[in-house]
Amino acid sequence: MGKVFDFHLLLVLLLTALHSLQLSGASLSRQSKAKNGVVSMELWCVAKNNAEDAALQTALDWACGPGGVDCGPIQQGGPCYDASDVQSTASFAFNSYYLKNGMTDDACNFDNTAALTSLNPSHDKCKFPSSLAVSNGSLASPSTEVGLGPSENLSGCNSVSFQWFWPLFMSTTLLFFFTTYLL
């Protein structure tokens, strides 16, 4: 009876490991593209969730004024207009500024009210262009290269866990159960 239970447990663990491997491949293909051995990932500059509305409004006013961003899409009648959601409105302006100004860390700061993310903030008819759609300040071909390094943006942790941690964890667990219970 113990061997039947162990076999079923082993089967469940094996299926979970295979499912984790499938998810890791799917998440990588959706978020990034490789070219000549360099992985490019779509990035957007968005307002931080914990930023104060007043600080966001000040940064939004600057981006649409002295910052030189085309804020037409977030004006009344535009596809991204939402007077009740300053975070979404500021995110569109921040992202536009980031794309227009070289996609540097400084271009996505806005007095520490903005951060980079790999999660697409587009919603309904409001489409946010990504870093892959910009080259030399104009919409074009993929150009952003992303490597592993220090960052405050932890939104990619989930994909990293699916790519490395879970497959490694599941294969180690399977090996342990196989050697312990079946041999």
Image: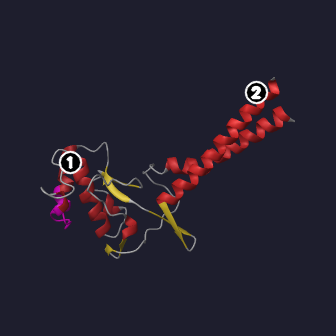
Q: Amino acid at mark 1?
A: Val
Counting from the top left corner in percent of width and height, residue 119 is at 40, 53
Relative to 126, say whether 8 is above or below: above
Q: Is residue 76 magenta-colored?
A: no
* Side of 74 where 97 appears, left or right: right
Residue at x-position 61% and y-position 45%: 19
Label 1 or label 2, whichever lies nearer to me, is: 2
Task: Report x, y in % for residue 49.
Answer: 31, 44
Q: Secondary structure at mark 1?
A: helix
Mark 2 lies on a secondary structure that is helix
Q: Earlier in the sequence, mark 1 or mark 2?
A: 2
Total numbered circles: 2
Q: In this figure, which colouring scheme has been used for the structure? A: secondary structure
Residue at position x 20%, y 55% from top?
A: 60
Q: Is residue 165 above or below residue 106?
A: above
Q: Amino acid at mark 2?
A: Phe
User: In the rendered view, would you say 174 is above or below 150?
Assistant: above
User: Where in the figure is residue 121, as x and y percent of width and height?
Assistant: 33, 53
Q: Is residue 112 toward the left or the right of residue 68 in the image?
A: right
Q: Which residue corresponds to the image point at 27% horizontal and 58% vertical from the top-left?
A: 94
Residue situated in front as seen by the camera: 49 or 73: 73
* Residue pointed to by mark 2: 5
Q: Of all residues shown, which one is farthest toward the right?
A: 183
Instruction: Judge whether 169 appears above or below 133 on screen.
Output: above
Disc 1: which residue = 86
Compute the Cα span from label 1 to label 2.
55 Å
User: Magenta span covers which residues?
Assistant: 61-72
